[in-house]
Amino acid sequence: MNPKLLLFIPCLCFGAITLRWVKEDPSIKSLKTQLADLQQQLQGFDELKKEVERHRIELGWGKQHVLEIEGRKNELNRKIVRMSDDINDFKHDSAQMERWLSALQQQNERVKQNDSKRIQHLQEDFSANRKRVKDAQKNNATLREILDELKLRSLLHPEDMTNAT
């Protein structure tokens, strides 16, 4: 027989015995149990890793949301400041308008007083002129009567008229 074959047969027997011994060895069973536990832990670790990644994504979304809210807050604050400035400008303009209206009302009162004084003077002048006109009308009526009387006399006594001139 071949010397290599002779060496192969004991090796084969030794391998079969060792394999049988390994299958029945309690430490191998404990290694298999530990290996199964490690596989479960690895699966749990993968799940935790996925969950951590989801939390990171959610945290990113949360940060983005916070940034958007801060942006809105800043925009609202700018609008509030602008509104406050507009309100202050409006109050200032209103105060100026009130002063202007007050000045106009005072001027209007002065004009009314001046107008009522002028109207009173005009009424007094009108009354005085009316009285003068009535007096003048009376004088005219009297002068007409005198003139009519003179005309009548001159017709009756023309010689008196020539002597009077």
Image (tube, helix red, strand yellow):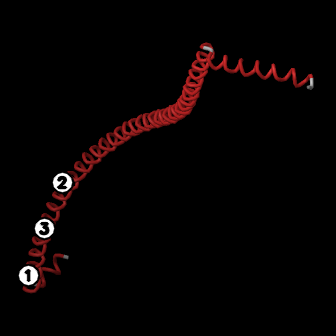
- Taking the image as shown, residue 94 lies to the left or right of residue 24, namely left
The residue sitting at 58% across, 23% down in the picture is: 36
Work out which residue is located at the far right of the displayed protein and give it.
2
**Element carrying mark 3:** helix
Q: Nearer the viewer, mark 2 or mark 3?
A: 2
Label 3 to label 1: alpha-carbon separation? 20 Å
Work out which residue is located at the far front of the displayed protein and give it.
1
Q: Nearer the viewer, mark 1 or mark 2?
A: 2
The amino acid sitting under disc 1 is: Arg
Q: Nearer the viewer, mark 3 or mark 1?
A: 3
Closer to the N terminus: mark 2 or mark 3?
A: 2
Label placed on residue 124 = 2
In this rendering, the answer to whether 34 lies above or below 117 is above
x, y percent for residue 90: 40, 39
Label placed on residue 7 = none
Say few, some or many: other residues with alpha carbon within 10 Å of mark 2 (under 14 / 14 to 19 / 20 or more). Answer: few
Please name whichever residue, 139 or 154, is drawn nearer the observer in this view of the structure. 139
Label placed on residue 139 = 3
In this rendering, the answer to whether 9 lies above or below 25 is below
Q: Quadrant of residue 19?
A: top right
The residue sitting at 32% across, 40% down in the picture is: 102
Closer to the N terminus: mark 1 or mark 2?
A: 2
Please name whichever residue, 140 or 42, is drawn nearer the observer in this view of the structure. 42
x, y percent for residue 146: 10, 74
x, y percent for residue 48: 55, 26
Q: Quadrant of residue 29?
A: top right
Closer to the N terminus: mark 3 or mark 1?
A: 3
Q: Quadrant of residue 49?
A: top right
| Residue hosting label 1 | 153
**Element carrying mark 1:** helix
**Element carrying mark 2:** helix
